Image: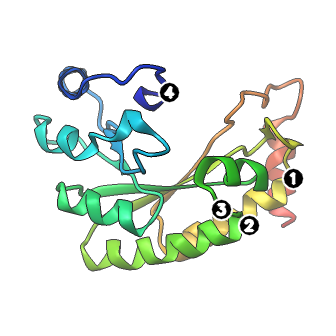
């Protein structure tokens, strides 16, 4: 969640002030903005302005989200040193979130990875809907494992698994069961 989920567009100066305050809290990483289409996410239309105006602190990483090559190019032009690609383990969620299938998203990410490596930019991978999806219900762990494996093979230094809708409770699905299902992949 974050600024992109606000109904009203938050001003760039408020975002910059907020990130600068977060930089004083001892965090080692602050996800700063998203280089996504303002047509689809108007709240992030000021990504370049935000990233170029924050007061970067020594020892803090300021990663940004980049769903595709265009977003990556804009992020690089704004001085990004770390980016994150974001996919999903749900076809429906992938379509609604980034307007393409899981396979197409992985193809797009390959280009992002190549250009990131050429520019010495670290890339983290996000996988959304690892337990459940608002459109499809329960997600099969082998899909999560496959998407994660593909991102690792591409060169992501880290994979972040997201229980996007918060259904991964101990009573619903144990972590050990999930891990065992992934191992069987």
Q: Which mark is residue 100?
A: 3
Q: Earlier in the sequence, mark 3 or mark 1?
A: 3
Q: Residues within 10 Å of mark 3 (few under 14, many from 20)?
A: some
Q: CA distance from mark 4 to mark 1?
A: 27 Å
Q: Earlier in the sequence, mark 3 or mark 4?
A: 4
Q: Residues within 10 Å of mark 2 (few under 14, many from 20)?
A: some
Q: Nearer the viewer, mark 4 or mark 1?
A: 4
Q: Is residue 100 left or right of residue 115?
A: right
Q: Is residue 110 left or right of residue 134?
A: left
Q: Residues within 10 Å of mark 4 (few under 14, many from 20)?
A: few
Give the residue displayed 65% in from the left and 68% down from the top: 149
Residue 80 vs residue 37, the one in the foreground: 37
Q: Is residue 108 left or right of residue 134?
A: left
For the residue labelled by badge 4, is the local secondary structure a helix, a strand or a loop? helix
For the residue labelled by badge 1, is the local secondary structure a helix, a strand or a loop? loop
- The residue pinned by badge 2 equals 146
Q: Position of residue 56 (x, y in %)?
A: 13, 39
Give the residue displayed 24% in from the left and 21% down from the top: 18
Give the residue displayed 24% in from the left and 57% down from the top: 81
Q: Which mark is residue 5?
A: 4
Q: Position of residue 76 (x, y in %)?
A: 23, 62
Q: Nearer the viewer, mark 3 or mark 2?
A: 3
Q: Earlier in the sequence, mark 2 or mark 1?
A: 1
């Amino acid at each position: 969640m974050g600024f992109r989920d606000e109904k009203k567009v938050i001003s760039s100066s408020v975002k910059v002030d907020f990130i600068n305050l977060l930089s004083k809290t001892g965090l080692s990483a602050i996800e700063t903005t998203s280089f996504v289409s303002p047509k689809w996410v108007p709240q992030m239309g000021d990504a370049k302005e935000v990233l170029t105006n924050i007061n970067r602190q020594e020892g803090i990483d300021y990663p940004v989200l980049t769903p595709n090559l265009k977003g990556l190019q804009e992020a690089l032009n704004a001085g990004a040193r770390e980016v994150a690609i974001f996919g999903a383990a749900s076809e429906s969620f992938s379509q609604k979130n980034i307007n393409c299938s899981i396979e197409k998203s992985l193809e797009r990410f390959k280009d992002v990875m190549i250009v990131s490596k050429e520019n010495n930019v670290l890339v983290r991978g996000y996988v959304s809907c690892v337990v459940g999806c608002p459109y499809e219900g329960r997600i099969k762990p082998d899909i999560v494992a496959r998407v994660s494996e593909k991102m690792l093979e591409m060169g992501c230094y880290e994979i972040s698994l997201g229980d996007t809708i918060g259904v991964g409770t101990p009573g619903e699905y144990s972590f050990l069961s999930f891990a065992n299902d992934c191992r069987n992949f």
